[in-house]
Image (cartoon, rainbow, N blue to C red):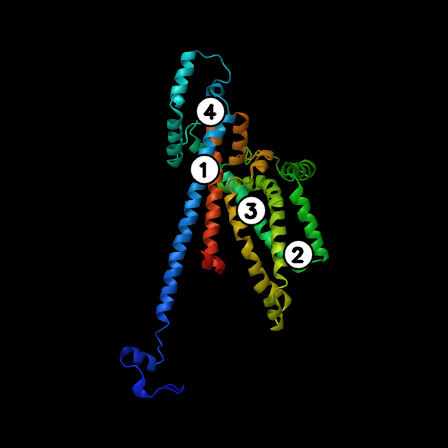
């Protein structure tokens, strides 16, 4: 048949293919779907491998730089240990041998890499204790302060930022922008001093520093209340500083979505203004902030150095500052690697999450 009319029954192909064609081939799309799933799975494998390899390279660069940088800026470890007390050359040689400083540089670097990867971080010059024990001892205090402050900052910043962006140009928006800029530009130590001056010195509502009061009874609830009482001012300071960044970024993301056609369509369907904001604008505005949130999770470990110093909070941040002034090179190296590794891991998690929530990443790999 060449006139474009449908073929007669004898002209149709016979066999399974012809039978499938007669039935409309309901199962025909299954093969492309399976192939698409295979391509997506393979694409994710390559995507994951690429970013894991990048994270591993970044971590190796951190280890390499920390080994050499702190050897340049921290001085001679023997002088730090003896605190300039007179020691004989034999004693200095024995101490260098004990610390492994008499070994070739490549051997010291290899021992440093293997020790870091196996959590054998050495001993602190200042505290004469294993560094791993110091980190484990102080990490809960840092997580309590930074974690509480970060959760409050993210929730408040995203919620208020979304409302401010949605009500662009209103008094509420202008007030939040002014507040955010003020908090964002204020030095953390200055803001901490103001908080101490107002709430501790003048009003006498909260303690100035530390995490516990020596006179608190040892039972659980008394200790919990006392820690919470000491926690208020550091968390208030930390939250105020971090909140400003999330406020401005979420507001900017919502402003970018205001001209979207999908919002006009949602309004045309009869949705109320708050429903359009909550169900359409905010979910799309949250996508660019995913990386920011994961970076925030990474900075929970190292993001409160100044706050801990101002309030004498016994966490990793205050340990880092004390080690700078001593100087305690092994502790500085260990904390530098820990802070960097937490950020690298957070960025890696953000990249993996992007694969699932952003179709553009899946298309480009």
In the picture, measured across the screen, residue 201 lies left or right of residue 45, that is: right
Regarding mark 1 in the picture, which secondary structure is present there?
helix
Q: CA distance from mark 4 to mark 1?
A: 25 Å
Residue that appears at 46% across and 48% down: 348
In this view of the protein, which residue sits in the foreground, 157 or 38? 38
- The label nearer to you, 2 versus 3, is 2
Image position of 229 with respect to 280: above or below: above
- Return the x and y of residue 195 as percentages of the image width and height: 66, 39
- Return the x and y of residue 173 as percentages of the image width and height: 69, 55
- The label nearer to you, 4 versus 1, is 1
Q: CA distance from mark 4 to mark 2?
A: 51 Å
Q: Identify the image quadrant of residue 278.
A: bottom right
- The label nearer to you, 1 versus 2, is 1
Q: CA distance from mark 1 to mark 2?
A: 41 Å
Residue that appears at 34% across and 80% down: 21
In the picture, measured across the screen, residue 198 lies left or right of residue 8, that is: right
- Return the x and y of residue 233 as percentages of the image width and height: 61, 40
- State which tag comes first along the sequence, 2 or 3: 3
- State which tag comes first along the sequence, 1 or 3: 1
- State which tag comes first along the sequence, 4 or 1: 1
Regarding mark 2 in the picture, which secondary structure is present there?
helix
Q: Residue furthest right?
A: 171
Residue that appears at 41% across and 55% down: 44
Whether residues under marks 1 and 2 lie with C-beta atoms below 8 angstroms apart, the answer is no
Q: Which mark is residue 164?
A: 2
- State which tag comes first along the sequence, 1 or 2: 1
Whether residues under marks 3 and 4 lie with C-beta atoms below 8 angstroms apart, the answer is no
Identify the residue position indicated by label 3 in the image: 150
In this view of the protein, which residue sits in the foreground, 165 or 348? 348
Q: Which mark is residue 125?
A: 4
């Amino acid at each position: 048949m060449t006139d474009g009319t449908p073929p007669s029954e004898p002209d149709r192909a016979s066999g399974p293919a012809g039978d499938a064609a007669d039935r409309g081939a309901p199962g025909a799309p299954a093969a492309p779907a399976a192939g698409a799933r295979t391509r997506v799975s393979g694409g994710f494998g390559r995507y994951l491998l690429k970013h894991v390899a990048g994270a591993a390279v970044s971590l190796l660069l951190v280890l390499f730089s920390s080994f050499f940088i702190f050897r340049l800026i921290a001085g001679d470890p023997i002088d730090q240990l003896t605190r300039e007390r007179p020691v004989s050359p034999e004693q200095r040689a024995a101490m260098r041998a004990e610390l492994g400083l008499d070994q070739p540089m490549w051997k010291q670097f290899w021992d440093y890499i293997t020790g870091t990867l196996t959590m054998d971080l050495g001993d602190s010059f200042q505290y004469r204790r294993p560094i791993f024990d110091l980190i484990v001892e102080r990490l809960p205090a840092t997580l309590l302060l930074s974690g509480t402050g970060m959760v409050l900052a993210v929730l408040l910043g995203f919620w208020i930022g979304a409302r401010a962006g949605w009500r662009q140009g209103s008094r509420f928006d202008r007030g939040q922008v002014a507040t955010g800029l003020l908090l964002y530009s204020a030095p953390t130590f200055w803001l901490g001093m103001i908080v101490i001056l107002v709430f501790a010195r003048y009003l006498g509502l909260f303690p100035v520093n530390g995490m516990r009061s020596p006179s608190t009874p040892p039972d659980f609830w008394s200790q919990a209340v006392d820690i919470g009482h000491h926690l208020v001012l550091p968390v208030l300071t930390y939250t105020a500083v971090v909140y400003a960044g999330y406020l401005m970024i979420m507001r900017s993301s919502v402003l970018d979505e205001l001209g979207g056609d999908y919002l006009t369509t949602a309004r045309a369907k009869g949705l109320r203004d708050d429903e359009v904001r909550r169900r359409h604008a905010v979910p799309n505005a949250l996508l660019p902030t995913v990386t920011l949130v994961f970076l925030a999770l990474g900075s929970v470990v190292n993001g409160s150095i100044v706050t801990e110093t101002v309030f004498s909070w016994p966490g990793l941040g205050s340990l880092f500052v004390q080690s700078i002034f001593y100087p305690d090179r092994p502790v500085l190296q260990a904390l530098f690697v820990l802070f960097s590794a937490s950020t690298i891991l957070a960025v890696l998690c953000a990249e993996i999450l992007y694969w699932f929530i952003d179709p553009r990443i899946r298309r480009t790999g």
